[in-house]
Image (cartoon, rainbow, N blue to C red):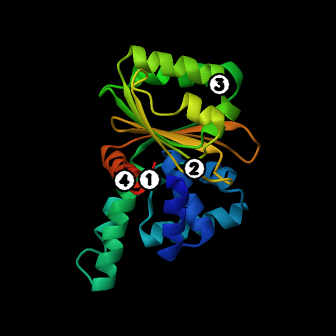
Amino acid sequence: MLVKSYIFNALLDFGLSEGEARTYLAAQAILGADAQELKNRVKCSTAGIYKIVSALLRKGFLETPAHSYPSQYFAVPLEKIAGQFSNRSRRLQRISERLKDLGKLGSLQTETEVYEDTALTDYYLNIPYSIGENRIWCVGAFGAVKNFLGVEVEKEFIAQRVKKGIHCDAVIFDESDDSKTIAGTSKSEKRDTKFIANDHYPLEFTYLYDDTIVTFFRDSDQKVQVLKTKSPELARAKLLQYQLLWKSTAR
């Protein structure tokens, strides 16, 4: 689940309505938005947006400068909202801690882009030049690599990775002949691979390197998207997950 979707669902758990949660996230995205901008982003009536804004102001999720005209609205940081709960009952203390965690998630550097044709190829082949620690994890379906980029592009990617001296640990979710030939264990290509046999593997794959996680997948319009997240904490959690997956995979 993407970070914004997680925060949205958490805001619903805290008692905000769907309109209030969407408006709060819109205010995070547009600093100093006025009511018209929020209305356009949330897609509701004029009366509806003013009702929502009033509720968020009252609940402490939005704030507005006293003398701005038209009124501008700013999302209050989740960490600051957490302070409202920190010294109260045990239940509200738990809410406080979760809001702090959400605030950290909301500050992650995330990029989502839609790529097609040569733009996707260029992005993919540039990854080896972005790696600083000379080690990368690849987890996912090799069928997705073939589907999104093609075998020849993958061979070029491997050549560039090897030239840079970057070792790859790979967990591949299929055992096709192409997978075993191109993505299998190879000392000359600085790669150790384990395979998970699965006829219904998800058509996506993820690279983990340094403090960066990059996932390639198809959206509902069948366009390839790249979700890039930079976070030392999240990268460490992913690394632990992949290491456990590696140990639990027989071959």
Residue type for callout 1: Ala
Disc ID at residue 247: 4
- C-alpha gap between disc 2 and disc 4: 53 Å
**In the picture, residue 229 is in which quadrant?**
top left
Q: Give the foreground label among 4 and 3.
A: 4
Of the residues shown, which amino acid type is indicated by label 2?
Answer: Asp
Q: Are circles 1 and 3 on residues that touch, CB within 8 Å?
A: no
Q: CA distance from mark 4 to mark 3?
A: 28 Å
Mark 4 or mark 1, whichever is nearer to me? 1
SS under mark 2: loop
Above or below residue 53? Residue 191 is: above
Whether residue 28 is visible to the viewer of this picture, yes or no, is: yes
> Disc 3 residue type?
Val
Q: Quadrant of the N terminus?
A: bottom right
Q: Position of residue 220 (x, y in %)?
A: 74, 48
Q: Note whether 92 is above or below 193 in the view shown.
A: below
Q: Which residue is mark 3?
A: 151
Q: Which residue is mark 2?
A: 34
- Across and down, in percent, residue 244 comes to 36, 55
How far from the left and from the top, in percent, is residue 188?
41, 20
Q: Residue at x 40, y 23 (%)?
A: 130
Circle 1 sits on which residue? 250
Frontmost residue, 208 versus 166: 166
Q: Badge 3, how many Cα within 10 Å: few under 14, some, many 20+?
A: some
- Specify the label residue 156 is tagged with: none
**245 horizontally vs 220: left or right:** left
Point out the frontmost of discs 3 and 2: 3
Q: Residue furthest left?
A: 87
